[in-house]
Image (cartoon, helix red, strand yellow):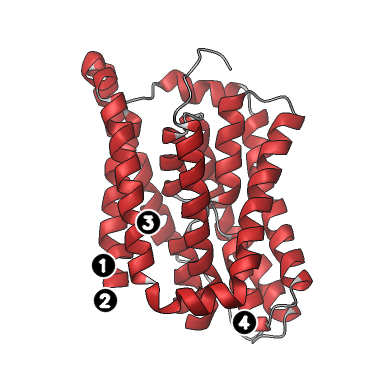
C-alpha cells in the first residue's frame, strides 16, 4: 500500500471519524429538528451543491479551454458531494454543524444518481471515451457516510445527552483538536501529492482555484440573498466549496481508469484546504452569539 493510499484509506477516515465524534458532543436532536422545520437553508445548500457547482465547473472548463482529460477531471470534482472535511471546517468556523452534516448526507446520497448522468454528458461533450458505463459504488458510498459521519456523530450525541457537563467541557479542546488534525491532514495531502503539484498547478491551478472561490462566493451570496443568518451562511459557503476529493479520486482512477484525470482533483484538494484554513483562521476567532 502506497503512502497516498494509507493516508486516504486509513489515516484520513479515522481522523475524520474522531472529529465527527467530538462534533456530535456539541449537537442535540433539536439542532436537526430546526433544520427539518426550516428547510430553506437545506434547499439553498443542495441547489448550490448539485446544480450550480457542476454548471460553474462546466463553464470554467470551456472558458479555460481545458483539454478533454483535464476538463473531465474538473467535472468529476464538480459533480461530487461535500465530504466530512466540510463538517470539520464548519465546526471550527462556528457555523451550523447540523445543517452541514445534513447537506453532506443528503448530497452524498442524491449524487449517486446525478454523477453518472452529468459525467456521461461531460465525457461525450469533451470528446473522451463515451462507451464507459459509470456506476458508482452505492453500498460503499453509503457505508462511508455511516462509518465516518453518522455513527460517530450519533455516539457523540449520546454522550452529550448522558454526560452533558463533560461534553460541554470538551467543546473547546475538540475544536482545537479539529484544527490540529486539519493541519496534519493538509500536510499529509501535500506529501502524498508532491510529485504532481508542480505539473498540476501549471495545468489546472488557476481554474481549480477559480472553481473553489466562485462556488464558495455563490454559496455565501445565495445564503445572504435569502436572508439566512451567519451560521447558516457559513455552512452553505463551506459545503459549496469543499468537495469529497476521495470519492472524486475513486471515480477518476478506478471507474474511469484514468490517473491523469486525478490532476485537477489533487490540485483542487490543495486549494480547498488553503481556503478552508483561511476561513477557519478568520471565523474561528469570532465570538459566538446566541443569535446571529
Q: Residue placed at 58% from the left, 56% from the top? A: 111
Asked if the residue under mark 3 is in contact with the one under mark 2, i.e. CB atoms within 8 Å, the reply is no
Count neighbours of disc 2 (C-alpha within 10 A) and say few if under 14, some if 14 to 19, many if 20 or more: few
Quadrant for the C terminus, please.
top right
The reply to whether the C-beta atoms of the residues labelled 1 and 4 are less than 8 Å apart is no
Asked if residue 147 shows in the view, the reply is no
The quadrant holding residue 29 is top left
Res 248 seen here: yes
Chain-order first, disc 1 or disc 4: 1
Which residue is label 2 attached to? 2
Q: Earlier in the sequence, mark 4 or mark 3?
A: 4
Q: Residue at x 62, y 78 (%)?
A: 70
**Which residue does the image show at 51% across and 22% down from the upper left?**
33
Check the image and report above or below for 244 versus 224.
Answer: below
Q: Position of residue 84 (x, y in %)?
A: 42, 47
Q: Which residue bears the numbered disc 4?
A: 69
Mark 1 highlights which residue? 6
**Rounded to the nearest whole Å, what is the CA distance between mark 3 and mark 1?**
14 Å
Is the residue marked by circle 1 packed among few (<14), some (14-19), or many (20+) residues within 10 Å? few
Contact flag, marks 1 and 2 (Cβ < 8 Å): yes
Q: Residues within 10 Å of mark 4 (few under 14, many from 20)?
A: many
Label 4 secondary element: helix
From the image, tell me which residue sits under label 3.
186
Amino acid at each position: 500500500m502506497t503512502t497516498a493510499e494509507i493516508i486516504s484509506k486509513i489515516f484520513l477516515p479515522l481522523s475524520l471519524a474522531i472529529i465527527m465524534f467530538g462534533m456530535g458532543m456539541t449537537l442535540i436532536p433539536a439542532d436537526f429538528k430546526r433544520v427539518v422545520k426550516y428547510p430553506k437553508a437545506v434547499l439553498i445548500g443542495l441547489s448550490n451543491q448539485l446544480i450550480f457547482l457542476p454548471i460553474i465547473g462546466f463553464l470554467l472548463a470551456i472558458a479555460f479551454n481545458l483539454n478533454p482529460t483535464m476538463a473531465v477531471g474538473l467535472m468529476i470534482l464538480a459533480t461530487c458531494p461535500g465530504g466530512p472535511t466540510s463538517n470539520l471546517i464548519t465546526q471550527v468556523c462556528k457555523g451550523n454543524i447540523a445543517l452541514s452534516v445534513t447537506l453532506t448526507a443528503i448530497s452524498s446520497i442524491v449524487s449517486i444518481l446525478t454523477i453518472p448522468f452529468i459525467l456521461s454528458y461531460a465525457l461525450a461533450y469533451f470528446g473522451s471515451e463515451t462507451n464507459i458505463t459509470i456506476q458508482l459504488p452505492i453500498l460503499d458510498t453509503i457505508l462511508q457516510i455511516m462509518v465516518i459521519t453518522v455513527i460517530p456523530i450519533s455516539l457523540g450525541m449520546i454522550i452529550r445527552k448522558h454526560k452533558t457537563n463533560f461534553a460541554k467541557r470538551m467543546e473547546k479542546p475538540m475544536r482545537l483538536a479539529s484544527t490540529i488534525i486539519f493541519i496534519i491532514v493538509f500536510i499529509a495531502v501535500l506529501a502524498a501529492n508532491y510529485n504532481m503539484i508542480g505539473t498540476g498547478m501549471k495545468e489546472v491551478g488557476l481554474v481549480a482555484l477559480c472553481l473553489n472561490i466562485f462556488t464558495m462566493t455563490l454559496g455565501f451570496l445565495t445564503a445572504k440573498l435569502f436572508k439566512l443568518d451567519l451560521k447558516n451562511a457559513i455552512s452553505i459557503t463551506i459545503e459549496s466549496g469543499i468537495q469529497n476529493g476521495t470519492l472524486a479520486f475513486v471515480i477518476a482512477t478506478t471507474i474511469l481508469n484514468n490517473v491523469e484525470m486525478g490532476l485537477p482533483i489533487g490540485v483542487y484538494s490543495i486549494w480547498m484546504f488553503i481556503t478552508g484554513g483561511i476561513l477557519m483562521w478568520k471565523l474561528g476567532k469570532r465570538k459566538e452569539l446566541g443569535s446571529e
